[in-house]
Amino acid sequence: MKRLIIADLKSFNNHGVQTGHYFSLARNYQELFGKICKISVAGGPIYKTGFKDEELIKLPHDFIAGGNALKNKWGTLMNCRYLIRHTSTDDVIVLQMAGAVTNFLAILLFGSKKKRTYSIQYDTEALDTPLKRFIYRLAKNKISGILCPTDTIGKAFNLPYCVVSDYIYTSEKTDIQTIPFNQKKYDFAMVGRITPEKGVVEAIKKLAGTKYKVVVAGKASTTEIERQLKKIASTNSNIELHLEFVSDKDFYNYLRESKYSLMNYQGVYTNRSSGVVLDTLFNGTPVIGHRCIALQFIEMKRVGYLFDEISKFDFSITEDQDKYHSYINGINCYLNEHKQYKIMLSSFLGL
C-alpha cells in the first residue's frame, strides 16, 4: 500500500507547545487520504504531544523558540537528511511550509530525484531575494511539484503545481448547523496568534465601548501588543480577552459562538493564505475582513464581507439577519466545492 508522508522539517517548539497550523494540516491529510493509503506524519520531538507513535516518523530535532538560530537551522537540515534516509522511492512526501528557504536548502543537500517530494507554498517569500532564488533553482530538480492556494504562486515556482486551499473540508456534511443567530454569544471573534500584521489592536480600538461584544483569544507575539489590549479591555466591558495559547476546543467554540470572525489583516498577511479563514468557514462562521489578496475569495464565494478601511466600517452589519443567512448559504456552497479539491490533490500526488 502506498504511503503518504506529511512532513514538518522545522517542527517549531514554543516552550513545549506547538503553535501554528502544522498539527492541524497533518490531521487534515490523515482524514482526507487515510482510507486510500497509509499516512505517516514526520516531525520532531514536539510531535509526540499530538500524535501516536505508530503514526509518526520521529525526526531528531525541534526548532526551539528563542534558541540558537544556527543550531535551529542545522536541526532542520538534519531532519531532512533523516527523513530521506528513512523513506523509500514508493513514498510520497509532502513538506509543510516552515522556513521555506531552509527547506529548499535541505532538499538541495539531502533530497533525492528518485523520491517524489512536494512542497507546500503559501506565498512567494522564498523567492524574494537573489540568494533565495539561487538556492531554489539549485534545489528545484529534486522537487516534484508545488501545492499552493493561487495560480500566481504556483507559476512563480515554475514547476507543476496544484491549486488547493490550506485545509480541505473533510466532512460529508455540507449543510452546517450553526448556533441560531439570536443565540450567538459574541458579535465578533478574533482568534489565533496575535501579531502586529493582523491589525487586532486597531480593530479593538474601533470596537471599544460599542454595543458589539468581541472576543480576542490567542497568544500575543509581543508584550507591547498584550499591554495595549489589556489597557483597552480594562475600561471597555464589551471586549473579552484570553491572551494565552488557545486549545483546539476553545478555538472552535469561540468561532461557533460568534456571528462573524473579524480579520483586519495588514502587511505580510494581505498576500498569503490563512488557515484561520478556513477554520472559520469550516465551523459555519462568516468572515468580515480587510480587502486584500488573501481574503478576496470571501467576496467571490459570498461567504462574508470585506472593507477597505476599518476606521470607516459600519459594524451594524451584525444586526442584519438576512445578510448573515445569505453568507451561511454561501459557506454551504463553498464547502461543497471542497469535494473537488480532494480529487484534484489526490490525482496530483498520484495516490
Image (cartoon, grey):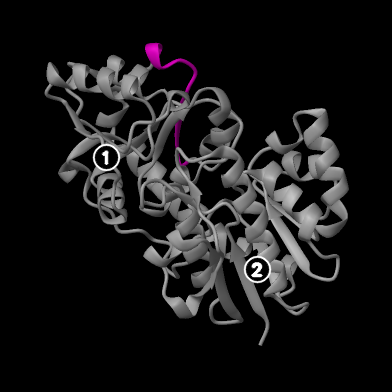
SS at circle 1: loop
Residue lying at 80% horizontally and 61% vertically, measured from the top left: 144
The residue under label 2 is which amino acid type?
A: Ile
Say which quadrant the N terminus sits in: bottom right
Q: Which residue lies most toward the top here?
A: 312
Q: Which mark is residue 344?
A: none
In the rendered image, the vertical position of residue 215 relative to residue 183, given as above or below: above
Q: Which mark is residue 343?
A: 2
Q: Which residue lies most toward the bottom here?
A: 1
Q: Which residue is mark 1?
A: 244
The residue under label 1 is which amino acid type?
A: Glu
**In the image, residue 305 lies in the stretch drawn in magenta:** yes
Which tag is nearer the camera, tag 2 or tag 1? 1
Q: Which residues are magenta?
A: 303-312
Label 2 to label 1: alpha-carbon separation: 37 Å
Residue 255 x %, y % = 30, 45
